[in-house]
Each structure stands twice: as C-alpha cells, then as structure tokens.
Amino acid sequence: MNITAVPAPAAVRTTEERFRLDARTTVHADATVRDIADRLRQHLSASTGLPLASADGDAGTNVIRLRIDASLNREEYRLSVRGDAVTIVGGAPAGVFHGTQTLRQLLPPATLRRAPLSIRDDDALTIPGCEIVDAPAYRWRGLMLDTVRHFTEVREILRIIDLLALHHMNVLHLHLTDDQGWRLEVRGYPLLTEIGAWRPSTQVGRGEESGTPHGGYYTQDDIREIVAYAAARHITVVPEIESPGHARAALAAYPEFAVAGTAPEGVWTRWGISDDVFSVEEETIDFLCDVLDEVMDLFPSPYIGIGGDECPKTRWRDDPRTQERMRELGLDDEEQLQAWFVGRLEVHVRARGRRIFGWDEILEGGASGGFGAGTAVASWRGEIGARVAVKRGFDVVACPADQVYLDYRQSESDDEPIPTGIPLGWRDVYRFEPTPSGLTTEEADRVLGGQGNLWTEFIDSPQRIDYMLFPRLGALAEVLWTGARRRIDDFERRLPEYTDRLEALGVAYRRETGPRPWERRPGIPGSTRTREELAEHLARITASIADA
Ligand code: ACM
C-alpha cells in the first residue's frame, strides 16, 4: 500500500492490517487536544456521512485516539493505524494536529470533500495499516501573501490557512502595507484605511492604466478572526508593516510623515518602487511605533515584520533637513540612516518582548542599527543575506527569489498566463535548499526555515492564487518539512494522488499540460528574465552586504 501524503512522513512502515471507518467508529481525545479531535470528526463526518461520535474514557476498539506524549518534540507525532485503532500521539497539540492532517491524506481524496459522495466501494473507507514517525526539518514553514497589490478577502485567507495546515505549514506572513495600498485598520490613524486602502486605478501591462479602482482592508475584527482561525490550525500569522520605503499609501493618508515638500498625490497606481519614503523625524518614528503597538495588540506572533526592503534614498539625499538630521545623528550616509531607522523600530518591538522580521536590506548600513539577537532576516536576494545574517548572529528565513518566488512564471511556454520573473516550476522549487552550504552547525541552526513569497501585481483572484501556489506549494512544504530526506522521484510518484486531493478540495491548481484557464497577461518591461539575468541582478543589488 502506497502512502501518498504531502509532505512525505519521515518514516513509514506499512503493515497488512486495515482500519475501517464505519458507523461504530468513535473518536477519543485527551482534554488538551479535544478541539483537534472535534475538527477531525467534522471533516471526516462531512465527507463520509458517518457519525464518528466523540467517546469518553477508554473507548475500546474501532476508535481513533488522539493524545499527547510530552517525551516527543513539540511538532513531532506518531501515527499508528492498526486493525482495531488509529492512534495519533504528538509532543504537543501542534504535533497531534499534524498527525490528523496526515491521516486525512491516508484516506481517499473524496474524503476531503464537504459532503459525502455515494461511496459503493467497500474498501473506500479503509485506512492502510502503518506506523508513521514524523517531525519537521525546519521550524519556519511559511507562505507570504501580498495583500496590497491585490486585496484578498478574509474568506480566501481562511481557505489558504486550511490549505497550509494540510501541508504542515506553520507561518502565514501577511504583507499588509505598500506603495499601492494600506490594508490594516489602525484605530489611532483612521485615514490609513479611509484614504490609504483605495487606489483609483491599476497599472496593466507596459504602462496602461486600467482605470479600475481597487482597494479593501482588514478591520481589526477581521484580523482577530484570521489570527484565531490560524492559531486553531497551529499557524502563526506574521504581520508586516513596510518602512522606511514602500510607504506611499501611508504618506497619501498622512503627508506630514513624508520628507518635507514631497507629499505624494494619492495612493500609487503603478508597479515598481515608489521614491516616496518616510521622513526620519521623531514624529514619524512615533507614528510607526503607535502603529506597531496596535499591530502587536492584534497579532500574538513573536515576530513582527517591519519591511525594510528597496528603500530608495533620493528623497533623503535631496532634502537639506534629512541631511542635517543625518549629521546630528553622527551617521555617514543614507544606508546608515536606514539602519538607524529600522533600529529605532527594533528597540520598540523588543521592549514588548517581540522580535523584528525584516527583508535582508536591514543588513545594510553596517552595525549602526545595533539590532538585538533574535532579529529574523528574510533572505530574498539569493542566499547572500542568509550567509551574512547568520555570521552576524541573526536568525534567517530563506526565501530566495530564484527559488521560491511563487509569483514567477512556471514555464517558458507562450501560454503561461503571467510572463513574470524566471521560469520556476515545481521541480525548481523542490530543489530549494533553505540552509546555504558550508555553514557551521551553530550558524545552520540559525536558519529557522523558509517561505514562498506570493506577490500579487498580476494575481487578482482566488483562481490565480491557486494556479500560482499549486502544486508548487506542495513541493515547498516537502522541502521545509522533510529537508535533506526528500526525494524528487518519490514526490513525482505521489503527484497524481496529490492533485486528486487538490481537486477534491476545489483548488484550481496548475495542470502540467492542457488548456490554460485564463488569458496571458501582458508583462511589464524588465519583469521577464532568464535565470542568468536574475542572478546578475541580485548580485548587483546585494554588493554592499556581500562586502560587509
Ligand atoms: C522583495 O521582493 N522586495 C522583498
């Protein structure tokens, strides 16, 4: 009997036994994991029509048992399927939860549906006998979703959380603010969403404007719902508020925080990097700290994203007051000024017992930021950021553009709907190595894991999200869960049943061949590259940290 779960469990021993789900099957759980048992019962009941009653005490035979064994690591689990019982034991609720997600993949794909099909085959509700021992290779197994370039409704975020959970992923990084929109209600600054959440038009293709307004934002109740829904599925939602660059939507709402005389005219309707950046005045730092306070009240995440990428320096360079401030602060250049800026936010976040999470540009400007240990660096411009960060004692989330930018096109083909970036198929994603080679054991231990990044300039619907994420997210999840144990030929063997499961879940995944579901979008100049061109580009823009 073949096990086709994605990600693949670490160790599987199959047996000749069989467990049959039927009208007498009950579910028994320790009190601390009863919510997980209830969710499993709901899932399996909905798709099989079986009662799967909750059992108290020692439920005897024909039972699914869930319990904690504190001698296991937190996310580790054992799943045993025998003739009389299915037993899932985890080191903590997270481990038990992962076990239930694997169990769901041992049953036929139709059991992932939300109502029963008329199942005539007697074997259909039979789970193959096996003994599984499983634990993750990496602690951070994430997906970043850009909610700015196109807004994703709460119901879709919840659907994505369910899909991440099925893949044992445990981080959803929400990119909430940028030049093209501000997507989070902040009580102290209502104009951030009254003005900043809406743009009058959107760039399409090489320069044309659609003329179609776009916008939306998450209320604080929306966020509470998302965070709680994710937490119940053992997923941490990591928020990101961009600064000092990618700030145009905030500055359209509150121009007083712009560099003097550079208040922007409205939220940006173009793609790319706007020159509009925050000023370096105390009032601006206070504003961002106020925003981060509300963010920290809403998001229990130990990591708080502060952005830090792609901050153009022209506004700071051209402004006499900013230059004066730089001298007052004893800083030599704008890179140091950026490090100082991020350092101010870091001190604020650390004072509340959290850590900052920033793109690898926060490594620029030398030591002037003085960030605390535990700062996490999202290494996106190749792996140089990861190498430099671990040497400086920081933690790393690997998300190199050339390996896990899930907005990139999936083939060279002319019918690939979004002609952006380099061709990055699921096989390329499967080759992703989160830990750079040649690190010491201590340095390698600072690599928390990795994440795929889904930027949404060209992705404006759930169908497009699905097309870009699947099956690549399956490959990514397997990299992060199984690490060096993974085998691409085995993943390929499991792929047909994996995509059958996606189909049962209603996911509009990318099929390898056949008609494409939507029209090809025009690209933007310079956005389609070869792998060599991207490598050259990344080397150029990381030259300053490579030398540091
Ligand atoms: C990024 O892609 N600008 C992090």
Image: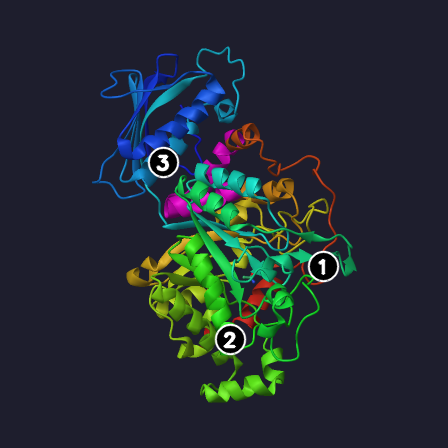
Asked if the beta carbon under badge 1 is closer than 8 A to the nearest atom of ligand 1, the reply is no
Residues at discs 3 and 1 in contact (Cβ within 8 Å): no
Residue 470, placed above or below residue 389: above
Q: Main secondary structure of the magenta part?
A: helix
In the image, residue 540 lies at what x, y percent?
57, 72
Q: Which residue is mark 1?
A: 524
Quadrant in the picture for residue 490: top left
What amino acid does circle 1 point to?
Ile
Q: Kindly report the distance in space between the C-alpha atoms of the residues bearing marks 3 and 1.
A: 43 Å
Q: Which residue is mark 3?
A: 97
* SS category of the residue bearing label 1: loop
Location of the C terminus by quadrant is bottom left
Q: What residue is pinned by disc 2?
A: 283
Q: Quadrant of residue 272?
A: bottom right
Q: Secondary structure at mark 3?
A: helix
**Is the residue 204 above or below the residue 499 in the image?**
below
The answer to whether marks 3 and 2 mark residues whose Cβ atoms lie closer than 8 Å is: no
State yes or no: residue 482 in magenta: yes
Segment tinted magenta in the rendering: 473-497
Distance of mark 2 from mark 1, alpha carbons? 37 Å
Along the line of sight, which residue is nearer the eye, 259 or 105?
A: 259
Q: Quadrant of ligand 1?
A: bottom right
Q: Are marks 2 and 1 in contact (CB under 8 Å)?
A: no
Question: Horizontal and vertical percent for residue 138?
Answer: 37, 50
Among the two numbered marks 3 and 1 on one chain, the one whose residue lies closer to the N terminus: 3
Q: Secondary structure at mark 2?
A: helix
Q: Residue at x 50, y 85 (%)?
A: 326
